[in-house]
Image (cartoon, grey):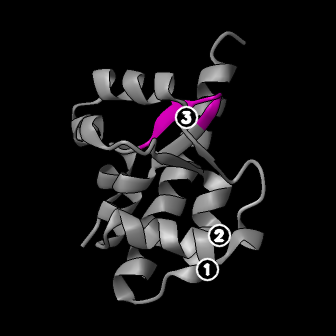
Amino acid sequence: MIKIEDVQDKVLQLRNENVIIDSDVATLYGVETREINQAVKNNPEKFPDGYIFQLSKFEKNEVIKIFDNLKKLKYNPVPPYAFTERGLYMLATILKGEQAVQTTLCIIETFVKIRELARTVAALPQ
């Protein structure tokens, strides 16, 4: 069973967005990365600009340096994709099954907590 902490550990900040890298999305959903990317490729209308983006080489190298769990990306010639919150919600409309439901619920709860924390931090100076 997936826990909110599992999702929180995978959220990164890139391009001023909270995102999860495709390989981590796959891990959370219990599938292979190619299955996640194939779902996106088969449903392009569900992933307009701002829902998913491919990392630049520089961004890829930076996340590999900073995050130990992404070291496996080092030897992959294709830069990974990053799913924004909106992209993750759309992905949830495609993926089916009990694990997909539980994972989606944890992802939603995680992003709600991130927003609440951001509001709290913003209110501190006041």
Residue contact between numbered discs 2 and 1, judged by CB atoms under 8 Å: yes
Residue 117 is tagged as 3
Separation (CA) of disc 3 from disc 2: 24 Å
Disc 1 versus disc 3: nearer the observer: 1
Please, is residue 120 above or below residue 42 in the view? Answer: above
Q: Amino acid at mark 2?
A: Met
Q: In terms of depth relative to the viewer, which is nearer, 72 or 103?
A: 72
Residue at (29%, 72%) from the top-left corner?
A: 30
The part of the chain drawn in magenta is 11-17
Which residue sits furthest top? 125
Dot 1: within a 10 Å radius of its alpha carbon, few (fewer than 14), some, or many (20 or more) residues?
Answer: few
Separation (CA) of disc 1 from disc 3: 27 Å
Q: Amino acid at mark 3?
A: Leu
Which residue sits furthest front? 77
Dot 3: within a 10 Å radius of its alpha carbon, few (fewer than 14), some, or many (20 or more) residues?
Answer: few
Q: Amino acid at mark 1?
A: Thr
Whether residue 9 is in magenta: the answer is no
Q: Position of residue 53 (x, y in %)?
A: 62, 46
Residue at (31%, 22%) from the top-left corner?
A: 66
Nearest to N terminus: mark 1 or mark 3:
1
Quadrant for residue 98, please give it: bottom left
User: On the picture, is 24 further left or further right than 57?
Assistant: left
Residue 8 is tagged as none
Q: Position of residue 116 (x, y in %)?
A: 60, 41
Secondary structure found at label 1: helix
Q: Position of residue 78 (x, y in %)?
A: 43, 45
Q: Mark 2 sits on what residue?
A: 90
Separation (CA) of disc 2 from disc 1: 5 Å
Secondary structure found at label 3: helix
Residue contact between numbered discs 3 and 2, judged by CB atoms under 8 Å: no
Please, is residue 101 above or below residue 22 in the view? Answer: below
Q: Mark 1 sits on what residue?
A: 93
